């Protein structure tokens, strides 16, 4: 299985609720940049699961709009900002798809990356906004995966 862990793009600083924060224009651009890098590798996605938060749903929508044959995203509570990676691992054990996109937040995605690749959270790699980490694994379990790459948004060049 290949898990693609995509942190939401840059979101507005505040809204009436945290879950209601929207992506900024820069956030949409960050996500589009990562999506184009992903597409250039000719990678596929069979299933997509997304946090209920607006910024995560907008991230998934922007990302999937750049991918050929993209699946319909499914919103799941296990990817909510207040969830922990251990709960998400239990959900992942039930998935039969080969190439799975998870769109969510920190700390859950950075924790999941550490647990799946190192078996602990001693040396977390903190995913920045719109970063995507690939985790390749045969079995969902502590330290059972490897991270062949992390895609990062390309910085835009300021106008002169």
Image: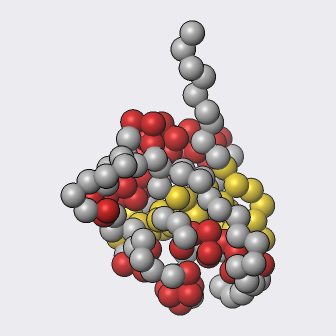
**Extreme-top residue of the structure:** 160
| Of residues 47 and 141, the one drawn nearer to the viewer in this rendering | 141
| Of residues 86 and 68, the one drawn nearer to the viewer in this rendering | 86
Residue at x 78% of width, y 61% of height: 148
Quadrant in the rendering for residue 2: bottom right
Q: How far across and down, in percent of the image, does residue 115 sit?
A: 69, 80
Q: How far across and down, in percent of the image, does residue 31 sit?
A: 50, 45
Q: How far across and down, in percent of the image, does residue 16 sit?
A: 21, 58
Residue at x 40% of width, y 59% of height: 56
> Is residue 83 in sight in this rendering?
yes
What is the quadrant of the N terminus in the image?
A: bottom right
Q: Please, is residue 16 above or below residue 42 in the view?
A: below
Q: Please, is residue 141 above or below residue 41 in the view?
A: below
Residue at x 47% of width, y 65% of height: 104
Q: Is residue 26 left or right of residue 159?
A: left
What is the quadrant of the C terminus in the image?
A: top right
**Extreme-left residue of the structure:** 16
| Of residues 88 and 65, the one drawn nearer to the viewer in this rendering | 88
Residue at x 55% of width, y 81% of height: 85
Quadrant in the rendering for residue 55: bottom left
Quadrant in the rendering for residue 143: bottom right
């Amino acid at each position: 299985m290949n898990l693609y862990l995509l942190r939401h793009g840059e979101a507005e600083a505040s809204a009436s609720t945290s879950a209601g924060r929207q992506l900024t224009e820069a956030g949409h651009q960050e996500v589009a940049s990562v999506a184009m890098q992903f597409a250039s590798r000719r990678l596929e996605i069979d299933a997509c699961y997304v946090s209920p938060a607006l910024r995560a749903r907008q991230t998934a929508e922007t990302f999937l709009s750049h991918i050929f044959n993209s699946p319909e995203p499914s919103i799941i509570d296990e990817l909510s900002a207040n969830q922990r990676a251990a709960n998400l691992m239990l959900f992942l054990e039930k998935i039969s798809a080969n190439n799975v996109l998870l769109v969510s937040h920190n700390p859950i995605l950075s924790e999941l990356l550490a647990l799946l690749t190192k078996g602990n959270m001693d040396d977390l790699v903190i995913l920045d906004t719109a970063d995507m980490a690939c985790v390749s694994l045969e079995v969902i379990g502590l330290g059972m995966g490897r991270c062949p790459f992390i895609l990062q948004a390309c910085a835009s060049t300021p106008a002169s």
